[in-house]
Image (tube, rainbow, N blue to C red):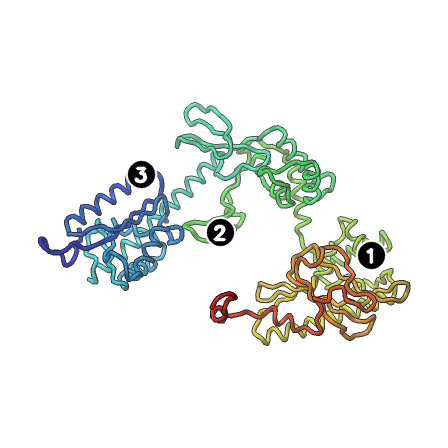
Amino acid sequence: MPSAPGHRSGLTAPLRAAQYVRMSTDHQQCSPIFQRQAIAEYAAAHNIRIVRDYEDTGISGLTLRGRPALTKLLVDVENPARKFSTILVYDVSRWGRFQDVDEAAFYEYACRRAGVKVIYVAEPFENDANPLTCVMKALKRAMAGEFSREISRKVFLGHCVNVQRGYHSGGPPGYGLQRVLVDGQSGARRPLAPYQYKSLQTDRVILAPGPPHEAALVRKMFEWYAIRGTTAADLARRLNDFGICNGAGRPWLPQNILQILRNEKYIGTNVYSRTSSKLDAAWEQLPETEWIRVAGAFEPVVGGQLFEAVQRKLVRIRQIPDREEIVAGLRKVMKKTGTLDQATLRRYRSAPSVERVMREFGSLYEAYEVLGYLPRLNPERSRNRCVERKMELSLVDITKEKLRELGHDVRYEKHTNVMCLDNALRLQIVVRSSWLIRGHSPYWVVRWPDCFAIDFLVYARIERAVPDFLDFHFFPRGSLTPGVYTVIHRNGVSRFEDFRRPDLKPIVELSDVVPLDALVRIPFAGMA
């Protein structure tokens, strides 16, 4: 056992120390007691008085994150007014099982740099600068990290064995399913309510169809999607209209429906190891070849043929068409209807989506030019729109160049006219000419987008087919009703005079960042 330097029996004052205790799981109830006992014996034998206690209970030692006691200890070490000069720890593994041995050494060095020594009371080496001690500590740290890796491998293999035997690997069962506890001795089964878990290591948990009304609704979801041609959004809307909530008691979202339609457990297949986050690493998606898939592990809720029909439809929807496929789809709609516009494309589910066409071509008008299609619009209005679009792009190019000169990161989404500054501020820039009442009396209208989020709408006014800016309106979020056309200028009068500006300087002001030290120098109102 290491000895504390400078100890002399008799008249010397005892050293003041803090003790750090950690146990990793609730199954180690005696571990803190043994640690405290060993630390107390060491302190009594070396004239040390324990004045502070730090304990992390039921916390893994893989990282510093989530260990409040050790974090507080490291903060207190840097405080010159601390009441201790030594830290007593049971052994190297209690300090941490860091996967990088240098991380454990760094925290110990931080203590030593502040004048606080770390002593491992149960280790066979002296905690000094001796080369042999350094080698032993590095070896112990590596062994502590390897122990966690070995335990992780054993736990993962144990889960794999249980999955292959048809048992549930953990997590919520899902809508229309329920967890069932299987007694390891008698084989008796009973359903588990939410937040109920097995109490015996020999017990096992399987999945089974849940309440009859939920299982029936899941089957209806698959039937509606595969046979009636409805979408996930349609299903969510229909369920919400009927007042049916999801498993969490909230309204249905399209992604909730898709999660059910894609999950193989509804046909009784147990799938495990689709994602991985071992040893506190970042979550990663594993290739399908590494998944563990056990067919027929649970009683199915839906039939295999219906499930496969849904999967084929999902695959078709997820496929991203190229330009040739989009053009072919548009020509098919033209041949069938004789016209092309947003309403027509949204009415035919087999047609390319409006959003996909705009992402590929930039606008519907550019797609019309590729097809050689003349939209059934007022020719003057069509020319005005072309002028508006060219001026929008010109305005965006000038703004991007200026902001980048000022050191800002600028990204532009062509299909939405949205500019993102420094990955924080989102602006939509639009150029609009006037509308006319009975061929005269021009007025301008604005529409806040309702299908994507922005922070400001920059609205530039021009005369009809005249490439010259009149003024600019800067509308912040909340100033306009999304999806509603609002008149902003009529009879020579702006109805939003407070938002009107002669140029684009407000964009530079909005994107400007005030340094923190500048804020400190600003005197607050009401203070001397």
On the rendered structure, is 212 left or right of 134? right
State the image coordinates of residue 392 (x, y, percent, origin top left).
73, 69
Could you give the CA–CA distance between mark 2 and mark 1, rounded to whole angstroms? Answer: 45 Å
Quadrant of the rendered image containing residue 452:
bottom right
At 57% across and 30% down in the image, what residue appears? Answer: 210
Q: Which residue is mark 2?
A: 283
Which SS class for mark 3? loop
- Reply above or below: 207 against 392: above
Residue farthest to the right? 438
Which SS class for mark 1? loop
Which SS class for mark 2? loop
Could you give the CA–CA distance between mark 2 and mark 3, rounded to whole angstroms? Answer: 31 Å
In primary-sequence order, the first of circles 2 and 3 is 3
Q: Which residue is mark 3?
A: 29
Q: Amino acid at mark 3?
A: Gln
Residue 340's disc number: 1
Look at discs 3 and 1 and give the one toward the viewer. 3
